[in-house]
Every structure is written in C-alpha cells, then in structure tokens.
Amino acid sequence: MSIANGREFLAIPGPTNIPDAVLAAMQRPAVDIYTGPLVRLTDSLLADLARIFATEGQTYIYAANGHGAWEAALTNVLSRGDKVLVLESGRFAIGWGEAAKMLGCEVEILPGDFRRAVRPEAVEARLRADSKSEIKAILVAQIDTASGVINDIEAIGQAVRASGHEALLMVDTVASLGCVPFAMDRWGVDVAMAGSQKGLMTPPGLGFTAAGPRAKAAHKKANMRTPYWDWTFRDGPVHYHKYCGTPPEHLLFGLRAALDMIFAEGLDRVFARHRLLAEATRRAIAVWAEGGHLDFNVENPAERCNTVTAVVTRSGESAQPLVDYCRDKCGVVLGRALGWSEGKGFRIAHMGHVNAPMVLGTLGTVEIGLSALGLPHGKGGTAAAIEFLAQSVPV
Ligand SMILES: *Cc1c(COP(=O)(O)O)cnc(C)c1O
C-alpha cells in the first residue's frame, strides 16, 4: 500500500524545488558565448547578485557548487600559513575551515555548540586576545544547514569592529541568501559566498562570491590565488574571462528566471513568506514534541532559522523509519540529520520555492508517519500550523 504518486516532493535543504519558470528558461539551444545577449545576461546577473548580497562590492559567478565557492573565497584573500578563526555552530563553517586547512592555512576553531548560535561576545574576546593580529580571517555560516541555527551576522560584525581587529569577516550564505535578510556592506562583511541550489531556486552548479574593498586589498597580497578562482582575471573586460572559460549558459538562464521571480515578489515579501512558513513548521514540531520523543535541535527559539528546521529524537533513537515511511509511502523526501545528530533526527526544509501547500503537505505527511509508526507525539501539529497561518495571513 502506498499513497506516493507523481512528482516526489523534496523537503531537503538543497537542492531545493526548482520553479517551472526556471526549468523552462533552461530549455533552449546553446548560444554564442562572445557577444550580445549572453554578455548582457552576465552583466545583469552580477548586478542583481550584488543587490541580493546588499553590497557595492564586486560579485563573481563560478561553474561550481558551494564547496567551490568556499575555495574561491579563501584562495582570493589568504596566503599559506595565514591563521583563520572558524566560528562553530554546526557543520558548515567547520567544513569551510577544513578546506582552508587543506589549502595551507592554520585553522583555529572557536568552539561552539551544535545546538546553539555563535556568541558574538566570545568572538570579540578571542579577537581582543589576539594582540599580535595573527588571525587574518573569520569564517562563519549565516545559517548552518545541519543544525538549523541562524547566526547574528550583524552582531558578529559589530563584535569584530568593537575588538578593533583587522581580520576579514567571511560569511557563508549558501542556505540563507534570498531567504532571510543579509546586508553585506552595512554589517561589515568583507567576503560573502553562496550557491545556486538553495534559496536561489536554481539547479546546483553555480557558486558566487562577493568581495568588499578590504577583501580586494587583501587579494593583492594573497599567495593562494589560482587561475580558475582568481578575481583579478575575472575583473577584466573579456566576457570569456568572467567564467575563466565557457560560461555555464543554461544555469545562467535559469538563475535569471529565478532572480526575476524573487524581485517580482519583492525581497521583503520573500523574507516574510519564509518567516511564516518556518514558524508554521515550528508550531507543528512544538506540538509533536509534547509527546516526549522529538525535540528541536536548536534549544533557543530565537536561534532557529527560517530555511530549515532540524528535529532530533530525545532518546537518540534513529528517525530513519520515519524518513523511509515519508519517502516510500507518501512521496515526501525529508532531510537526513547531519553532524552531531547524524542518524537520530531529520530536517524539514522550507527554503526557496515553497508555499503553503508544500509546507503543510510535508507537515501532514510527517504526522501521518508519526501515527502510522506509533511514535509518541502530541496530536494536532499540522492543525497548529494551519491555525498559525490563518492568524498570520490576513484577508
Ligand atoms: C549546502 C551548503 C554548503 C555546501 O554547498 P554544496 O553546493 O553542497 O557544495 C555550504 N554551506 C552551507 C551553509 C550549505 O547549506
């Protein structure tokens, strides 16, 4: 017996659902890579990415995933032997730090917690203690997709400035850009990076970096630069150089359609939609958690992000039967738990191209699974989500 049919619904935090308009924009022949429309397309994308990062700085597009954009960010501003400070709050900043280490940086982790956000005061204290200014860069994820934490980048930026330290602030926005507010210049961020396949609703395969003036100055002295990632090469006037080779044209057409959708809806409305659908998800989970079996990974409600919610089992029991049931019987793919909670939880993404039926359908499916498997849970989680949306979305 199964009630799965038709398109499988992805509730994983990347790749996310791709809008039909984005798929349709990619369904076309290849075009010339040297002239006319493609050159103008690149100019429009670079400008609109800067708008989404909220920066006057320079943006770059790579044929790469998020890991590639990590490497782009690091190699453009650092030199071998430089020390970087990684702000732990889950898995992803740690992963970025591992890349830095392999490239030849000395990596120090400011210890955090898989269930908590980075504490800005701890960042300030660590920087003040670095009297010889050995730390050259600080790596942090705005949203950690494994833990479901949102870090307060504005407060971290203030902490960096308050310490008087010169280290570059480098932020991973892969799971947050285009979903929650980000203000690169205003928050004092020197380098930001992202990818195409999460909030930006485009197939995987594009990585982005944005560089502010302090990052561009550090770039001049950096000795880790490599031909493919190098900003200077891409800054020139030649279109072919902007991608260090053949542009990933079809992904660019898709990204154009996705950005058009985001701007047509309006960034503020996109953020509000994410906030509402995330809160609806949290309302459901809070009710289920009353059964004593499930819990939020992130302990402090204010630190739960609006793009993905990580759920853990209190006993450490595997959530795999529930994940399997939702996929095999109902056609909904939940995210696996990562890092500290690996194997003992699941994640529900509410990121990018999402609306009420997608999120309520996912919540309803989880609730079917909880009941069918006889897992202890408070009854009426989906109903609580519905009630929250009814109260929050005026006529
Ligand atoms: C998904 C993700 C990445 C890695 O992106 P890939 O495209 O899988 O390489 C990095 N950071 C964060 C916060 C992510 O969510």
Image (cartoon, helix red, strand yellow):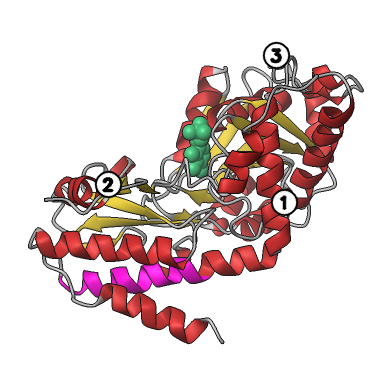
Label 3, secondary structure: give it: loop
Label 1, secondary structure: give it: helix
Q: Is residue 138 magenta?
A: no
Choose top left, top right, bottom left or bottom right for residue 311.
bottom left
Mark 3 or mark 2: name the one nearer the start of the chain: 3
Residue for badge 1: 260
Position above or below: 387 against 149:
below
Mark 3 or mark 1: name the one nearer the start of the chain: 3
Rate crowding at label 1 as few (under 14), some (14 to 19) or many (20 or more) other CA atoms within 10 Å. Answer: some
Q: Is residue 283 magenta?
A: yes
Position above or below: 82 against 136:
above
Select label 3 or label 1 by which is in front. 1
Q: Amino acid at mark 3?
A: Thr
The chief SS type of the magenta part is helix
Residue for badge 2: 341
Q: Are marks 2 and 1 in contact (CB under 8 Å)?
A: no
199 or 252, which is in the foreground?
252
Q: CA distance from mark 3 to mark 1?
A: 33 Å
Rate crowding at label 2 as few (under 14), some (14 to 19) or many (20 or more) other CA atoms within 10 Å. Answer: many
Position above or below: 283 against 171:
below
Residue range (magenta):
276-291
Label 2, secondary structure: give it: helix
Q: Which residue reaches farthest left?
A: 374
Position of residue 33 in the picture relative to residue 343 (left or right)? right
The tag on residue 226 is 3
Count of numbered marks: 3
Q: Which residue reaches farthest right?
A: 237
Residue at 63%, 53% (x, y): give it: 178
Q: Quadrant of the C terminus?
A: bottom right
